[in-house]
């Protein structure tokens, strides 16, 4: 059969992974799919009362969702692609109206494990954090279309959100540090608290008292003249991984 197409079995085996990756990439790169995914989650949050008003972006102008929570204010969620690239990790601005601002990385790439993608994105954010940009973000969120599937089993599957357009476990969420002068550590031990994780994870059925067990954090430290980064992921009580460099 392969001979009919001028291929040897060796050429077929070497080309197959790239062909699959290309197909996955073209599917996951669809802006419509990403828009449908995030819109589905936020619509479900509005219908279940976790947010009171939702303002969706006008694609082509921006990708910022505005979530209004009565008694607190507005949360900005900026839709981005894989965190490796400059556009997804550096090219953004926090809206003036937002009490908290998050980057939501929707990354369909299978070239690396999620942790490596996140690490690259955090590296770019660190440059921005210590750079000349005036604004910061409150946190970052990561999701891959395969998360929770048989191809990428998620330890948070028990809390899967099932809405009309979405069926997914809670995304990986990381609280970012605040800028502060005269210190050598920024959220290094994860002490920075945010409001939105309780709202987002609550929509996935995570009880308020368990939210800290599902909320990761990013921290920076200046030691010996060098900058260091810590990234802690949490998947439930007693389930924690920390990466430092």
Image (tube, helix red, strand yellow):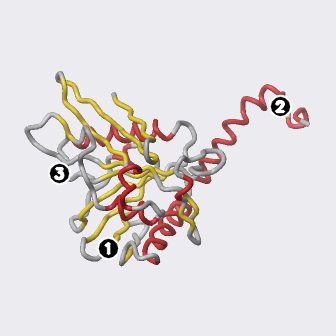
| Residue that appears at 76% across and 30% down | 13
Decide which of tag 3 and tag 1 comes sooner along the chain: 1
Mark 3 vs 1: CB contact within 8 A: no
Mark 3 lies on residue:
134
Decide which of tag 2 and tag 3 comes sooner along the chain: 2
Whether residue 162 is visible, yes or no, is yes
Residue 25 appears at what percent x and percent y?
Answer: 59, 47
| Residue that appears at 59% across and 51% down | 148
Mark 1 → mark 2, Cα distance in angstroms: 57 Å
Question: In terms of secondary structure, where does tag 3 sit?
Answer: loop
Mark 1 lies on residue:
68
- Eyeballing the image, is 121 above or below 160? above
User: What is the number of the mark on residue 60?
Assistant: none
Question: In terms of secondary structure, where does tag 2 sit?
Answer: loop
Residue 191 horizontal side relative to residue 169, left or right: left
Residue 72 appears at what percent x and percent y?
Answer: 24, 71
- The N terminus sits in image quarter: top right
Quarter-of-image position of residue 58 = bottom left
| Residue that appears at 52% across and 51% down | 156
Mark 3 → mark 1, Cα distance in angstroms: 24 Å
Count numbered badges in the picture: 3
Q: Badge 2: how crowded within 10 Å, few (<14), some, or many (20+)? A: few
Residue 2 horizontal side relative to residue 210, left or right: right
Decide which of tag 1 and tag 2 comes sooner along the chain: 2
Residue 151 horizontal side relative to residue 87, left or right: right
Question: In terms of secondary structure, where does tag 1 sit?
Answer: strand
- Identity of the residue furthest to the left in this view: 182
Nearer to us of marks 3 and 1 is 1
Mark 2 lies on residue:
7
Nearer to us of marks 1 and 2 is 1
Q: Nearer the viewer, residue 157 or 129?
A: 157
């Amino acid at each position: 059969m392969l001979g009919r197409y001028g291929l040897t079995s060796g050429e077929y085996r070497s080309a197959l992974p790239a062909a699959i990756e290309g197909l996955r990439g073209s599917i996951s790169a669809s802006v419509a799919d990403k828009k449908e995914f995030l819109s589905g989650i936020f619509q479900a949050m509005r219908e279940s009362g976790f947010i009171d008003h939702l303002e969706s972006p006008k694609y082509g102008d921006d990708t910022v969702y505005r979530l209004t929570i009565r008694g607190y204010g507005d949360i900005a969620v900026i839709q981005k692609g894989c965190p490796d690239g400059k556009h997804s990790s550096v090219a953004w601005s926090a809206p003036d109206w937002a009490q908290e601002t998050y980057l939501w990385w929707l990354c369909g790439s299978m070239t690396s494990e999620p942790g490596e993608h996140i690490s690259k994105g955090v590296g770019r954010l660190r440059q921005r954090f210590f750079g000349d940009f005036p604004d910061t973000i409150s946190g970052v969120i990561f999701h891959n279309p395969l998360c929770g599937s048989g191809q990428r089993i998620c330890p948070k599957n028990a809390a899967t959100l099932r809405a009309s357009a979405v069926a997914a476990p809670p995304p990986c969420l990381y609280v970012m540090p605040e800028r502060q002068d005269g210190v050598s550590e920024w959220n290094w031990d994860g002490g920075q608290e945010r409001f939105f994780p309780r709202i987002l994870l609550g929509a996935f059925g995570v009880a308020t008292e368990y939210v800290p067990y599902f909320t990761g954090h990013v921290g920076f430290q200046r030691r010996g003249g060098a900058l260091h980064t810590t990234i802690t992921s949490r998947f439930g009580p007693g389930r924690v991984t920390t990466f430092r460099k």
